[in-house]
Image: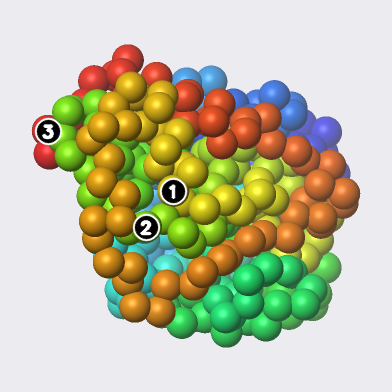
Amino acid sequence: MNGARAKRILVTGATGFIGRHCIPALIEKGFEVHALSSRGAQLPNVDSHEADLMNPGATAGLLSELTPTHLLHLAWYAEPGLFWNSRENLAWVAASLNLYRAFVENGGRRMVAAGTCAEYDWNYSVLDEYETPIKPATLYGVSKAALHSVLTRAADLDGLALAWGRVFFLYGPGEKPGRLVSDVIRGLLQGRTVETTSGLQKRDFMHVADVAGAFAALCDSDAQGSFNIASGEARPLHELLKAIGDITGRPDLLRVGARPMPPGEPPCLAAATTRLTQEVGFCPRHDLESGLGDAIQWWQTHGLPEG
């Protein structure tokens, strides 16, 4: 392999919530980073590119020009509240397969892609890469699981190294409204009453910088297969809510238990993280309290949007 491109990586979805945090983590590991977005946003310290992944010709042209050795595929439709059963998921399966083909045809060697914990059967409390059945309940989960299945077989035939990172629950600086942590933080900082469920359900939340760090570690490793991207610590949501209230200084505005639990809400979704910690060697830098403190400080520094 040409030494000049030994660690040249193309990152799709580079301006997204996870993607923009991946850039510094990949640079730290010595990658020559090429950031792709549909709007061609210029990012610091990397080569930025604009292309529409829904256009196979544009995708093929970009890959032919860059000939990356590595691909980190994060781009997907992720509008809060809408992505679970959107038909956009079908378009992204097709676009991802076109991207894979262009990557292989231009000498790509290693692909890391973002999956989701929604691929698993949520009737199980502990979600394990080896033991938990794949039985998604949403079109989003079905689409991701189907893409992973196709890519796994194709990578075997093409001799390409593939790693699939199943993201669990995340939060952090710059998170969009419409998600639990960002909405609670913004509400309390704006002095508004925030109503929630009882918060008895346990979830594994991870700071977005740690999620990005895990993906960067996967890109820089030889590990293959599926890996849970999570902290390995599932805690009741009421503990998360209490921590946000304490750090913001507005626990008085929290109304925990004021909203009913959604029907079918799983009582516990805990991630097994042995593969991530032992085979990839990755451990998160933030615990829940320090991560929430970082997110809250970001909101305080950058100001709060209306709503």
Between 169 and 30, the one nearer to me in the picture: 169
Query: x, y (%) of residue 83?
Result: 33, 66
Between 257 and 85, the one nearer to me in the picture: 257
Between 194 and 133, the one nearer to me in the picture: 194
Q: Residue furthest top?
A: 301
Dot 3 lies on which element?
loop
* Residue type at the position of mark 3: Glu
In this view, 26 is above or below 138: above
Colouring method of the image: rainbow
Report the residue marked by disc 2: 198
Query: x, y (%) of residue 21?
Result: 52, 33
Residue 89 lies in what quarter of the image?
bottom left
Sequence order check, earlier mark of 1 and 2: 2
In this view, 284 is above or below 304: below
* Residue type at the position of mark 2: Ser
Give me the C-alpha separation between circle 3 and circle 2: 27 Å
Residue 219 lies in what quarter of the image?
top right
* Residue type at the position of mark 1: His
**Pointer 1 local density, CA inside 10 Å: few below 14, some 14–19, many at least 20:** some
| Residue 63 seen | no
Left or right: residue 216 compared with residue 62: right
The answer to whether mark 1 and mark 2 are in CB contact below 8 A is: yes
Q: Nearer the viewer, mark 3 or mark 2?
A: 2
Q: Residue at x 77, y 65 (%)?
A: 225
Sequence order check, earlier mark of 1 and 3: 1
Q: Nearer the viewer, mark 1 or mark 3?
A: 1
The answer to whether mark 3 and mark 2 are in CB contact below 8 A is: no
In this view, 204 is above or below 142: above
Circle number at residue 306: 3
